[in-house]
Image (cartoon, rainbow, N blue to C red):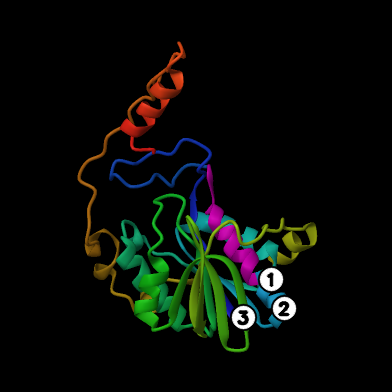
Amino acid sequence: MDIVVLVKQVPDSGLERNLNADKRVDRDGSNNVMGELDEYAVEAALQLKEKHDGSVTVLTIGPDQATETIRKVLAMGVDKAVHVSDEAIAGSDALGTSSILAAALKRQDWDLVIAGAESTDSGMGVMPHMLSAHTGAAALTGARSLEVDGQTVTVEHQRANGYSKLEAQLPAIVSVWDTINTPRYPSLKGIMAAKRKPIESLSLEDLGVEAGTVGEAGATNEVLSVEARPERSAGTIVTDEGEGGRALAEFLVNEKFI
């Protein structure tokens, strides 16, 4: 089974993140890491390869510095990488990004695409659905478990109040939550082996994607203004003078928590 994993290099969510002058996420700092949920997607792909054989390819879009994330993924055990990099990609919205990824997928042999359930920079989780529209493959999203039996893929779709069982035929596109597994750490052997693994670098021209259809020029939405998040207030203190329970309940009702 051939698997493609989508990963994205993003600013570390544990540190302060900023927007640049173009109102985009500032990615020029030194605190860039692999998207947190992408690590679970990589682990899911590696576990399926260990069970069913085949190959795992990592596919990412980003500037030259994204190779840092690619090397980490290769060190975890992924076989090879495809890196799409082109100055005209900057400013792409989800539609533009999906058309680039779909063009890159057309160059690959794949049975299954696995991604994180959402990106940790914008919080968007629409890419599996958009790639499904581009490729015709089924999208099974928000998985907390993932199994493949022959040509059938089955996931438990995680919900707030339980889960739903989803099933489809390969090829398929699956996104996963952090409840699905525990990502492995790259070993020293894996780190050394990663230096010899192939990384294919592609431009928009290589993919046959017109520069004017992606990037800022092709974006269908635009951030017009931004505001700083307001300072956290001191909150409401409920003093218990015999009626504390009632006052607390009234507060929760007013805030629509109950």
Q: Nearer the viewer, residue 240 or 76?
A: 240
Question: What range is drawn magenta here?
Answer: 31-45
Q: Position of residue 131 (x, y in %)?
A: 39, 74
Q: Is residue 232 above or below residue 120?
A: above
Kindly identify which residue carries mark 1. Answer: 47
Label placed on residue 141? none
C-alpha distance separating marks 2 and 1: 6 Å
Determine the main secondary structure of the stretch shown in magenta: helix
Label placed on residue 51? 2
Kindly identify which residue carries mark 3. Answer: 148
Q: Amino acid at mark 2?
A: Lys
What secondary structure is marked by label 3? Answer: strand
| Residue at image location 39% in from the left, 84% down from the top | 136
Which class describes the residues within 10 Å of circle 3: few (<14), some (14-19), or many (20+)?
Answer: some
Q: Amino acid at mark 1?
A: Gln
Q: Amino acid at mark 3?
A: Val
Q: Earlier in the sequence, mark 3 or mark 2?
A: 2
What secondary structure is marked by label 1? Answer: helix
Quadrant assignment for the N terminus: bottom right
Does residue 26 appear left or right of residue 148 in this picture? left
Asked whether disc 3 touches disc 2, contact meaning CB atoms under 8 Å apart, the reply is: yes
